Every structure is written in structure tokens, then in C-alpha cells.
Image (cartoon, rainbow, N blue to C red):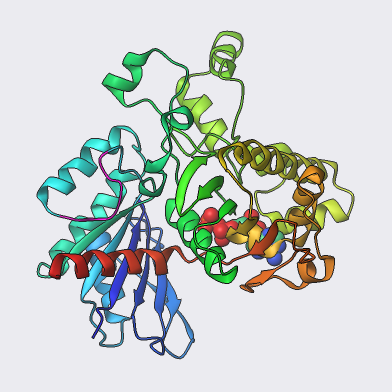
Amino acid sequence: MKPSVLVVNCGSSSIKYALISAEPNQPRLAGLAERLGSSNARLKGVDSQGRAFEQALTDTDHTRALEAILDRLEGRLPDAVGHRIVHGGERFTRAALIDDDVAAAIEETAALAPLHNPANLQGVAATRQLFPDLPQVAVFDTAFHQTLPPRAYRYALPEALYRDHGIRRYGFHGTSHAYVSERADTLSSLVGGGWLTAHLGNGCSTAAIWEGKSLDTSMGLTPLEGLMMGTRSGDVDPSLHAHLSRQLGWSLERIDDVLNRGSGLLGLSGLTNDMRELEDAAGEGHEGARLAIEVFCYRIAKSLAALSCALPRLDGIVFTGGIGENSPLVREKVVAHLPHFTLGLDRAANARTVRGREDRIDGRHPAAPRLWVIPTDEEGRIAAETRQLLEENNA
Ligand code: ADP
């Protein structure tokens, strides 16, 4: 029997989990422990009947939260644990079995992802404590983009910054871009087509994928580069830091905080980072909301057009992530900014493709690139990569 995998995505104060069986008729058990370390920590999820549950967690660190999660697995025990790890640097080009050496390498890479990798490692430590005999696998957000050629991943900076300090573009959301592009191949009966993928959630990124390999992507050294996001600015003039420091006396911490948590849809609208609320507000005439949506969509189109340079042939564009899957308005506006791609949106198909529907939303003209909406499945992909690695190791 194929192993069932507990997928763990551990943040500094949260653990997202999903128990995923390879048997098609076994339902996923999934949920989220949040606000860990605070007095109002909670565990929310769904059981095998699809019923939602929520419970308070007291005195909770990551290990205790995992114990509470274990109690919610209805007696089904995992055969392996798959961890989402944000940054794998240049060493990890694919998933890796976690031993002391791999854990140390993840820790070393924390210089490049100081907010994420240490939190991910807390999850690894807690699951190793709880399941000392189970294989633990690290699946990296950056690994899929390790196929970028140097012309796409190097910054035009002094060589020593790359050589001695690893300053280069890495890219993120790799499991999502890998999953939806592979799915687009399958749905289109293509073997290794040319895809532009747009993952539009709270974090947003685009990627150019050819024959199953990422050739360019919009995020860089950190997830701040590229598209405008929920609360992140995306690309700004690199001199902005110096300007804000010299002219306004802002500290590096303040600048970092504004660009990461006070900008994007939230900053530009002055209202919210939630696209649903922005669409409603724009409909009621809110100028900030309208502008935020305009800039957001224009920048996605601009990024897709730029990334198309990486592809020998464009077979289609894939929208995914909470916004990409659910916002016909955003998809329509993005497509409208790319008239030279002759995309041909099917408006009715676009309007009905929401809430987890996987569908093709172009007019199906044989010469036109396809437009797909494909709900992402990062957890499913992490489970699949975990299984594949274990199979290879046992072969
Ligand atoms: P995360 O990156 O945190 O995983 P998601 O992929 O869930 O986030 O995406 C969250 C975004 O999706 C939010 O901006 C939310 O408003 C947006 N979203 C979800 N449903 C809709 C909808 N029906 N219409 C427009 N935007 C939506």
C-alpha cells in the first residue's frame, strides 16, 4: 500500500497540516493551528465527514499543537511527514530526506529566509520528537526554480556578492507553479508545453515553464520582488531604501516593514488586502480600491509579457491561487492588457470558473494560447514528492 503523508507547513505561530493518503477514496484530514504561543491559540479543521471543528489550545508550543493535531487524525497514522521548507538555497534542487546534515543546511540557509526557515525547522524538530521513527522529507519552495539559467537568476551586481554571499534570484511558490504547469500539460494533452503561470494569493508570483522546467520567475532573492501582492509592494526603484532613509530618516526595519506588510493592495487602497472586499468597494466607487485593482492587474500582465521572453513557444497561461482561482474580474483585466497575445477570453466560461473549478476559459481557437484556471494543490504536491523520494530510496 502506498504511504499516507502528513504534510506540515509550519510558521512561527501556526501549523497548517493535511493527512493525505495515496488511496483515491480516503478523504484528506486538514486544518490549521494558529496563534500558537498566545492565550487564544486555536486548532481548526475538517474531519473525514467534511464537518468543520474548532478547539482552543492551551499552553501550546509547536509540539503540543502537533499532539492535538494527532488526536484529530481519527486513528489514521502517517507513514511519512512532508515539510514545506521555504528556502533551499542552491543546494536543494529537489526534495530531500531530512537527516542532521540536511537540517543543518536548512539552518544555514536561514540567512536568506530569516522569517521562514527557522519556523519551518521548529516544525521539523517537533515532528521528529513526536514521530522519531518516521521518515521526514523537506520539500522546498525554491527547488523548482533551480533550473533557471544564469541570465535569469543573476542580478547585475558585483560578482563577489553572488559568489561569497549567494545574492541571486531564487524564486518561490515552486510547488504551486510545478503542480499547475504539470496539470496544464495533462489537461491539454501536451508533453512539456510552454506555460506562463500566475499564482495570485496573498503572495503573488509568475513563472515561465518549458518542458516541465522553470526558466524564469518574478520573485527573487526574497518573496518581495516582482508582482504587487496583498501587503507587499513588489518591484520598486532599488534606490527607494536610500531615499526613505535620507529624506525621512526611516530605519531599515521600518522600510522593510512598510514594503512587506503595509504596501500592495492594502497600502495602495488604504482599505484592505482582501480582493473580495476591494472588488465590492471598487463597485461602490471607492477610488483607492479601484486604483489598487488596476495597478495589480496591469503589473501581472506586464510580468507575464516579460516572462514570455523565456519561452520558445507559448501554449497558454494558467491562473491559480485564491485570486487567480476566484476572480473573473482580475483574469479579464489581465487578459485585456495582453492584446498582442491574441488570447480570446470566453467571458461565460471565465465568469463561471470560481470556487475550486478547474476549467479552460479561452475561446478554443486552435491557433490561440490556452487560458486555464487550475486550483493549486501545494499540499498534494508535497505529499506526492515525499512519496516519490521514499519510493526511490526503497528501490
Ligand atoms: P494565501 O497566499 O495566504 O494562501 P490565498 O491563495 O487563499 O492566500 O488567496 C487569498 C486571496 O484570494 C485574498 O486576496 C482573497 O480576497 C482572494 N479571494 C478569495 N476568494 C475570492 C473571490 N471569490 N473573489 C476575489 N478574490 C478572492
Q: Residue at the location (32% across, 64% down)?
A: 385
Q: Is residue 94 magenta?
A: yes
Q: Residue at the location (44% across, 76% down)?
A: 45
| Image quadrant in which the N terminus is located | bottom left
Q: Is residue 260 left or right of residue 165?
A: right
Residue 275 seen from this side: yes
Q: Position of residue 200 (x, y in %)?
A: 60, 52
Is the residue 190 above or below the residue 264 in the image? below
Q: Is residue 177 left or right of residue 380?
A: right
Magenta-tinted stretch: 91-98
Q: Is residue 83 magenta?
A: no
Q: Residue at the location (51% across, 26% down)?
A: 254
Q: Position of residue 10 (x, y in %)?
A: 34, 57
| Image quadrant in which the C terminus is located | bottom left
Q: Position of residue 73 (x, y in %)?
A: 31, 82
What secondary structure predominates along the stretch shown in magenta? loop
Picture quadrant of ligand 1: bottom right
Residue 171: image quadrant is top left
Tell which of 209 and 128 is nearer to you: 209
Residue 381: image quadrant is bottom left
Residue 173 seen from this side: no
